[in-house]
Image (spheres, rainbow, N blue to C red):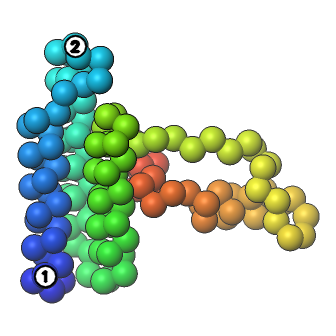
Amino acid sequence: MTTATRQEVLGLYRSIFRLARKWQAASGQMEDTIKEKQYMLNEARTLFQKNKNLTDPDLIKQCIDECTARIEIGLHYQIPYPRPIHLPPMGLTPLRGRRLQTQEKLRKLSKPVYLQSHDEVS
């Protein structure tokens, strides 16, 4: 990992903690605010800890993009949780046939960048 990438990753980590410190739940209730702050901190610690040994620059860039997207979406929608995607079970039609493996592959490819690591951690 280059020093510029390292600084970018550490900057994202710090910005998440700053965001969690200032976070207010949309409901305005204190217990919701505490739960959401705790979720943000636990999610950040878990994902950064899981990805700390990555050496592939493309994977690191993908994780940085995911982190940035999740921060922006959280700020925009005022929710710290990833926004779910809703696809009907056999909704993605491949060019030939409707096999389950093809559907699973298409679902994985259609997953937004901000949800790439969500299923692995949850």
Q: Mark 1 falls on what kind of element? A: helix
Q: Earlier in the sequence, mark 2 or mark 1?
A: 1
Residue at left offset 24%, top offset 29%:
36
Q: 41 left or right of 74?
A: left
Give the image location of residue 91, x and y in percent.
78, 49
Residue at left offset 10%, top offset 73%:
7
Residue at left offset 91%, top offset 64%:
97
Q: Are the two marked residues, 2 and 1, in contact with CB atoms closer than 8 angstroms?
A: no
Give the image location of residue 33, x and y in percent.
20, 23
Instruction: Please identify the quarter of the rendering in which residue 52 is found.
Output: bottom left
Q: CA distance from mark 2 to mark 1?
A: 39 Å
Q: Quadrant of the N terminus?
A: bottom left
Give the image location of residue 39, x and y in percent.
25, 35
Q: Nearer the viewer, residue 14 or 46?
A: 14
Q: Quadrant of the C terminus?
A: top left
Residue at numbered disc 1: 4
Mark 2: amino acid: Gln
Q: 15 left or right of 122?
A: left
Q: Mark 2 falls on what kind of element? A: loop
Residue at left offset 22%, top offset 72%:
53
Mark 1: amino acid: Ala
Give the image location of residue 30, x and y in percent.
17, 15
Residue 64 — which label? none
Q: Is residue 13 visible to the viewer in this orientation of the structure?
A: yes
Residue at numbered disc 2: 29
Q: 107 left or right of 43?
A: right
